[in-house]
Image (tube, coloured by chain):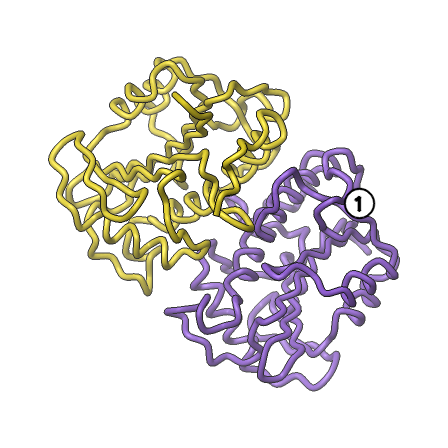
Chain colours: A yellow, B purple
Amino acid sequence: MARPVRTFVVIGHRAVTAPNFSLDDVPGTSGRLDVLLRCVAAAFVLSHGIRRDTEAYLILLGPPDPPRTVWIQGERLRHLNPDERTTAALFKKALALQPSGTAWLQSTPGIAVNKMKLDQVLERLKGRDLVLLEEGGQDVQLWKPGPNPVFVVGDDKGFTDHEIAAVRKAGAQQVSVGPLALHADHCITLLQNHLDRTVGPSPFSMAP
Amino acid sequence: MARPVRTFVVIGHRAVTAPNFSLDDVPGTSGRLDVLLRCVAAAFVLSHGIRRDTEAYLILLGPPDPPRTVWIQGERLRHLNPDERTTAALFKKALALQPSGTAWLQSTPGIAVNKMKLDQVLERLKGRDLVLLEEGGQDVQLWKPGPNPVFVVGDDKGFTDHEIAAVRKAGAQQVSVGPLALHADHCITLLQNHLDRTVGPSPFSMAP
């Protein structure tokens, strides 16, 4: 890997896998895709640019045709706005594509989609420092990350037993972000800040 | 003051002061009220409830009739959703009211509006630990907050010279949240987490 990369894997247990949700009511019509949209903003958006050293895999497991994995690469992204609605429109474009397996179909620059499951995403990220974000894990402020960490984050439903087992089997350590249970996007904000303070922002992290 | 309170004061320099913005394009029609809506979510929303120990003053300075200050009290709030659109609808209700001075008009439970300016909001919060969030300030992780801190946070435009002077004159210390410039809502998430870790969440902070 040429550059340090921060990777977030977020599982949307009910998040829809077709583009026919309403932009006027994303929380009510998309299986809470709004949770994932806020995770995207937390992972990528800086005050004056996009985090080029970050990527995210959003694993959507809702109807009608799960799974869909949306892969977002900060290095290639253009025009990511911080608001939920415009990111929802980008997801609509990604979900309008019909991937057949693990080949990536690009919808817009830096955003691609395929049909990978969690196990396949973990296999793809094999060899990197894997972190399961969970209550009761080691306090993130006491944890010294390696240069290329991969964080697995649950949505508002947390994780299934199978997911926890799969991530642990892949060698994950468990980390928590504080004494209260927070939304996934707030956890990602805290993790990015911890990386900024420890590993440090990479030189290209603030490129516009 | 009976209970520990965490207060956030956020200034929306262009944020509209009338309810005629479009819920379908909040960033484009409201003077970036969306920035403030995300601040509200960061300040109040927990995974399983609302932060009852938090309040916020959103000072709106955009057309047609500035200022409007929207006061949100966690203790009294009902039904605050984490998504931007439903919070935008709550702001529409607040901005439909016609306050004439510093008397609060309640629009929905826990949300009220008046015509206070920044100086008046600072006067109202006099005597409490005042913190100006600004790049170059003391690192928040090295700062030990008192039990009732007040944070003044800028929107995407930062602060005017007059605002900085007014907040400093009121006795503020300057604090920053990390090495990169972040959006206001991400700063608030980091501040709340720091308070959770130092002052500690108050016993009622997680009441649903």
Which x, y percent locates residue B88?
48, 67
Amino acid type for the residue under numbered disc 1: Pro
Which x, y percent locates residue B39?
57, 56
What residue lies at 58% left-to-right and 78% top-to-bottom?
B17
Relative to residue B16, is residue B114 drawn left or right? right
Which x, y percent locates residue B112?
63, 72
Q: Alpha-carbon neighbours of circle 1 within 10 Å: few (<14), some, or many (≥20)?
A: some
Between residues B53 and B123, which one lies in front from this camera angle? B123
* Residue A42 visible: yes
What residue lies at 41% left-to-right and 74% top-to-bottom?
B22
| Residue holding disc 1 | B147
Between residues A123 and A3, which one lies in front from this camera angle? A3
- Judged from the image, the secondary structure of the residue bearing numbered disc 1 is loop
What residue lies at 16% left-to-right and 46% top-to-bottom?
A97
* Residue A184 visible: no
Between residues A117 and A56, which one lies in front from this camera angle? A56
Between residues A95 and B147, which one lies in front from this camera angle? A95
**What is the chain letter for disc 1?**
B
Q: Is residue A59 above or below residue A77?
A: above
Q: Quadrant of the N terminus of chain A?
A: top left
Relative to residue B182, is residue B55 drawn left or right? right
